[in-house]
Image (spheres, coloured by chain):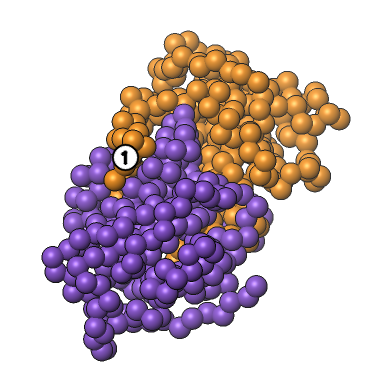
Chain colours: A orange, B purple
Amino acid sequence: MEYSTSSLINSFQPKEKHTTLFNHQISARIRLATQLDVPNLHKLVTQMAEYHGLSQIFTTTETSLYNNLFKSPNPPFHSPTALILEISPNPFPQTNHTTTNFVPIIKNNYNFDNLEILDHELETYRSKFNGHGSDNSNNCNVYVAGHVLVYPSYNGFFEKPGLFLDQMFVRKCYRGMKFGKLLFSAVAMQAEKMGMGMVDWLVADWNEETINFYEKMGAHYIPEYRLCKLYGDQLQAFGKKSD
Amino acid sequence: MEYSTSSLINSFQPKEKHTTLFNHQISARIRLATQLDVPNLHKLVTQMAEYHGLSQIFTTTETSLYNNLFKSPNPPFHSPTALILEISPNPFPQTNHTTTNFVPIIKNNYNFDNLEILDHELETYRSKFNGHGSDNSNNCNVYVAGHVLVYPSYNGFFEKPGLFLDQMFVRKCYRGMKFGKLLFSAVAMQAEKMGMGMVDWLVADWNEETINFYEKMGAHYIPEYRLCKLYGDQLQAFGKKSD
C-alpha cells in the first residue's frame, strides 16, 4: 500500500461557509485508526504542524504515517498508535465487542444551545471507516474531527511503563466542546486499563490555556525539564564517526 | 526469574579509600545489558534518582527492571533497552561478530596523565557479564561505570521514528573522562544505523554544563516545551471514570 504526499492545506481561514449539519446535538466516537484513515490523519498532522509554527521541520508523508502506524507486528499501544475522533449528527451504534485491545468510546447526543459549527472542510474529512457491518446507514454522516498519537514509553525511575502522548489535536471548528478532554481521558483510561504507571507529554510554555486544562485533569507540570533533539545532518554525522 | 528490591545506596560520600586499579590507562566498552546486569543496573538508576533529587518518586525494583527491559519479544531498541558502560585496566578483546543488532563499542587504553580514580564501590560494581568465552581472563578486572536507557519514539511531524534517551549516567568517579560522550555517541550512531530520524531527550534547565555538552554535539535545545506527567492516584482515577 503506497500513499503520495498531500500538499499542505491551510485550513484556518474559511474560504466559504457551509450550512451546519448539527442541530443542537452532536455525537462523538473515539476509535483506533485504520489504514483507511491515513489521508485524513495526514491532513490533521499537517494542520497541527501549521498551528504550532512547525511547518519548516515537517517531513511526515502519507507513506511514513502508514509505515510508522500500521506496519508493526505489535498490538495497538505497544507501538505508535493513533486514535481518531469522529463526530456525527446521528448517534453512533454502541459496540461492546471488539477484536482489538481498545473499546471505542461513544458519547451520543451532546446537547448545545447554540451549535453553529461552520465546517468548511466537512466533505474532505468524511470518515472512511466502516467498522460496523450491521449498521452502515449511520456511517453516511460521520466526519473526522481530531486525533491523538501515542506510543509506549518507559522511565527508569518508575516501576511501570507508560504511554507518551505525542499529539492531541481537535479541528478548530470543534474546539470548546470538551472533545480534547474526551481524547485525553481515552488515553489515560487506556494506560490505566493496560496496567501502566503514567502518561507523559509535552506542552508549549506559551499555551497557558492548555496547561490549565492539563492541571485540572490532575497532571503534574514539571517546569524544569527541557527538550533536546538531535536530527538531520547532525544525527547523520554520528553514523560516520569512527571515534 | 525473580529479583528482590535492593535498598537505597548512598554512594556520593566515600566511606573509605581504595587504591586505584588504574595506572595512566583505562579501557572502556559499551555493550547491550543482559539479565545478569540487573542488580548493577538497579544500583545505577537508584544513584541517578538520588543525584536528581527524585528518590521520593522512585519506584523501580530489580523485578521491574527485569520485566521492562528483558521480557519483550522485540529485538533491542524496538522496546526499552539498556546499554552498559564497562571499564577495565586491561584492554577489551575486539569483537566483530554479534548475535544482536548492536556491535559493542570498545575504546582501549585511554591515556591520562593523572588517573587517580578512587572507586570505593569497585567490588560492588564488578561486571557480571561473560560474553567472550574465548577470553575469560580479561573479565576479572571489568567493572560497571554507567548506563543509558533508551526506547523507540515517534513524532507525528517527522517522517522517521527515533530513539528516546531516557537516562544517561556515569558514576561520579568516572566523570570528566568523556565516557558521557561515548555513551551518547553510541545511541546516536545506533539511531542512524537503524535508519531512524532523531534522538530526543530531556535535560534539567539548571544543568548548564550538560546543556552545553549537548549543544556541542549538534543537538537542538528547544526551550519552550514543558513536561507533563500523569501518574499515581490521578492516573488511577481515569480507570474508574464512566464519563
Q: Residue furthest left?
A: B113
How far across and down, in percent of the image, does residue B110 sit? 24, 59
**Residue B22 quadrant:** bottom left
Q: Identify the residue shown where x is 48% and y is 64%.
A: B135
Where's residue A146, x and y in %? Answer: 55, 32
Q: Residue at x 44, y 66 (%)?
A: A157
Residue at coordinates 36% horizontally, 25% vertically from top-left?
Answer: A55
Disc 1 marks a residue whose amino acid type is Lys
Q: Quadrant of residue B118?
A: bottom left
Residue drawn at (63%, 75%), measured in percent from left and top? B2
Q: Crowding at label 1, few (<14), some or many (≥20) Cα neighbours within 10 Å?
A: few
Identify the residue position indicated by label 1 in the image.
A241
**Residue toward you, B159 or A146:** B159
Residue A148 in which image quadrant: top right
User: Circle 1 marks a residue in which chain?
Assistant: A
Mark 1: secondary structure: loop
